[in-house]
Image (cartoon, helix red, strand yellow):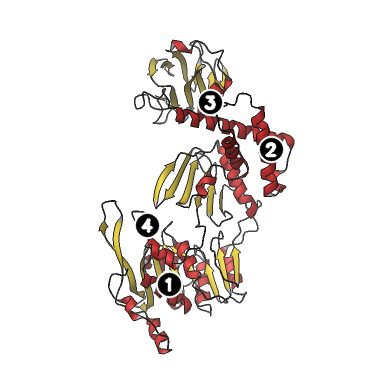
């Protein structure tokens, strides 16, 4: 318990009693002591208790925190005569606990450990001071992990080692030796701490992906979101949850991002603070750093399954019915142009990968992506990846450039990871000029929206084409639209398969072949539904039957498809 005596800019005084072990000061709603003024930050400073007494920590605001006329980052133990200034406010702190008198015999580790203890509202958690043993051990481990990681970085800087030129095995080996050396020199390191776990965690953060390593190894996790160094969320089974794992600092997150993008020839810095990349296993990575990311470096990883999924996997997941999978296989084998439409995170790329693997081996396939994710098992495969501009703003190679170039490479099929700009026009032209059986994805919520978005993307190519000409191109190029969606319970399903049949009175005509009908929810909140045909046979089936190919028309009957 301690009391803060506050003098505001108008010389009015008030006292705030803090019954907890810590208090946040600033103008944010979550702060225990709320102040106003342009020189006060949202979270300006923190006062916290250690075994040595009360300390104050500045949280990096522009105007800073001053104690007795000196700007400080951290100061303590505080005494009642210390004058603290933030902006136009002045403070004095009175410690109400007599037990804080003896400070000389306490180790310095307690002082450094305290800033890691999160400030809590005094009313909501009155027993915060009585921390449990596991919680204390976790905080202690985190403190030493951060301390040794910082010492490691300083040691590397002092020895002037060029770590970027080392092979992975050599880098990991040398870094491990350095960490062991630092741990051995730390006389204050608690004997109860698991030194091997500490070594492993620091090593992973220094040369690997830090706390993300164990999350990436967990096959049940599909997405990892680092909002800031101490706030990590993940998606498991279609649902978001917060994970207790944290990085030691923003510097550690930034280091992980740089280790991901550097081998790909990409960069991230203040002049180029956003980047798309991939991990070695193909997982998609997006990173954004300050000044655009206000809380600190932010990282999003969409994981890929360790093995390539196939149609049977999608059927097992309940993403498609066996009849839908059988139809899509026929469509791909007979070179129908397919557009996969869906929202963000609906599973478009996974479905594109499955459909691409229906293509017979021996055909010359060219895949074009922003960040290479597709994993095809074909022997005659060329994978192309777009490239961002360099530090001088030159050298960018867009997807559209790659699509144009692919047409000169004698492809049998072109697979574009996602159409999001003028490359849509080149893709349509490719589909119309002998490259049947091509596949792509785009963002749209319904098949009709997908057609409208295709028209918009073609206009982004800069060609002054009338809308009727664009629609004629779309109708002659696109055979099928497969609509993918993520349901309210997190499951990803194909909600519709439609055929583009023609154009009438200036409007593109479609017929629905399959759809997913929702039928409520079960007691656990899981969406109930069924896949069914729509009693419509695609036009190209008649052509295939006339050429002597045996086809099962019962697929399209309106019934429950198991």
- Residue 438 to residue 240: above or below: below
Q: CA distance from mark 3 to mark 1?
A: 65 Å
> Can you give x and y, in whole percent of width and height, for residue 544 in the image?
42, 85
| In the foreground, 492 or 336 | 492
Tell me which label, 2 or 3, sits earlier in the chain. Answer: 3
Tell me which label, 3 or 1, sits earlier in the chain. Answer: 3
For label 1, the residue is 467
For label 2, the residue is 177
Is 554 placed left or right of 142 in the picture?
Answer: left
Q: Secondary structure at mark 3?
A: helix
Front label number (2 vs 4):
2
Front label number (3 vs 1):
3
Residue 478 seen in the current view: no
| In the foreground, 402 or 249 | 249
For label 3, the residue is 113
Front label number (1 vs 2):
2
Q: CA distance from mark 2 to mark 4?
A: 45 Å
């Amino acid at each position: 318990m301690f009391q803060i005596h506050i003098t505001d800019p108008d010389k009015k005084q008030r006292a705030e009693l803090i019954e907890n072990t810590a208090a946040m000061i600033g103008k944010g709603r979550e702060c225990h002591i709320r102040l106003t003024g342009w020189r006060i930050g949202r979270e300006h400073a923190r006062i916290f208790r250690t075994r040595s007494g009360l300390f104050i920590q500045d949280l990096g605001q522009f105007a800073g925190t001053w104690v007795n006329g000196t700007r400080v980052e951290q100061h303590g133990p505080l005494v009642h005569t210390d004058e603290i200034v933030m902006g136009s406010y002045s403070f004095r702190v009175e410690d109400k606990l007599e037990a804080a008198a003896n400070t000389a015999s306490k180790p310095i580790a307690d002082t450094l450990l305290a800033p890691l203890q999160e400030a809590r509202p005094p009313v909501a958690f009155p027993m915060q001071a009585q921390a449990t043993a596991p919680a204390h051990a976790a905080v202690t481990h985190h403190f030493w992990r951060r301390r040794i990681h910082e010492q490691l970085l300083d040691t590397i800087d002092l020895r002037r080692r060029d770590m970027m030129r080392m092979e992975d095995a050599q880098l990991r080996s040398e870094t491990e030796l350095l960490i062991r050396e630092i741990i051995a020199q730390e006389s204050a390191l608690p004997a109860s701490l698991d030194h091997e776990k500490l070594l492993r965690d620091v090593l992973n953060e220094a040369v690997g992906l830090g706390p993300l390593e164990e999350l990436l190894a967990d096959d049940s996790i599909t997405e990892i979101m680092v909002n800031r160094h101490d706030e990590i969320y993940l998606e498991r089974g279609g649902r978001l949850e917060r994970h207790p794992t944290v990085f030691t600092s923003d510097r550690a997150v930034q280091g992980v991002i740089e280790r991901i993008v550097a081998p790909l020839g990409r960069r991230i810095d203040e002049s180029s603070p956003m980047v798309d990349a991939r991990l070695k296993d193909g997982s998609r990575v997006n990173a954004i750093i300050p000044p655009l990311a206000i809380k600190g470096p932010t990282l999003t990883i969409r994981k890929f399954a360790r093995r390539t999924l196939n149609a049977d996997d999608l059927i097992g997941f309940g993403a498609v019915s066996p009849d839908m999978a059988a139809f899509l296989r026929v469509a791909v084998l007979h070179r129908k142009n397919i557009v996969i439409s869906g929202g963000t995170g609906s599973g478009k790329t996974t479905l594109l990968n499955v459909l691409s693997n229906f293509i017979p081996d021996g055909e010359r396939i060219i895949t074009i992506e922003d960040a290479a994710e597709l994993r095809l098992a074909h022997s005659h495969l060329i994978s192309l990846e777009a490239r961002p501009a360099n530090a001088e703003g030159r050298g960018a190679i867009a997807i559209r450039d790659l699509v144009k170039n692919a047409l000169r490479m004698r492809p049998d099929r072109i697979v574009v990871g996602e159409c999001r700009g003028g490359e849509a026009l080149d893709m349509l032209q490719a589909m119309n000029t002998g490259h049947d059986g091509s596949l792509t994805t785009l963002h749209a919520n319904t098949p009709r929206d997908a057609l409208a978005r295709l028209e918009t993307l073609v206009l982004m190519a800069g060609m002054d084409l009338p809308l009727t000409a664009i629609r004629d191109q779309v109708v002659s190029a696109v055979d099928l639209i497969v609509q993918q969606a993520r349901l309210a319970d997190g499951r990803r399903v194909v909600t519709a398969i439609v055929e583009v049949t023609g154009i009438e009175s200036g409007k593109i005509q479609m017929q629905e072949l399959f759809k997913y009908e929702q039928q409520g929810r079960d007691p656990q909140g899981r969406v109930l539904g069924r896949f069914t045909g729509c009693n419509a046979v695609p036009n190209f089936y008649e052509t295939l039957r006339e050429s002597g190919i045996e086809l099962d028309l019962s697929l399209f009957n309106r019934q429950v498809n198991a």
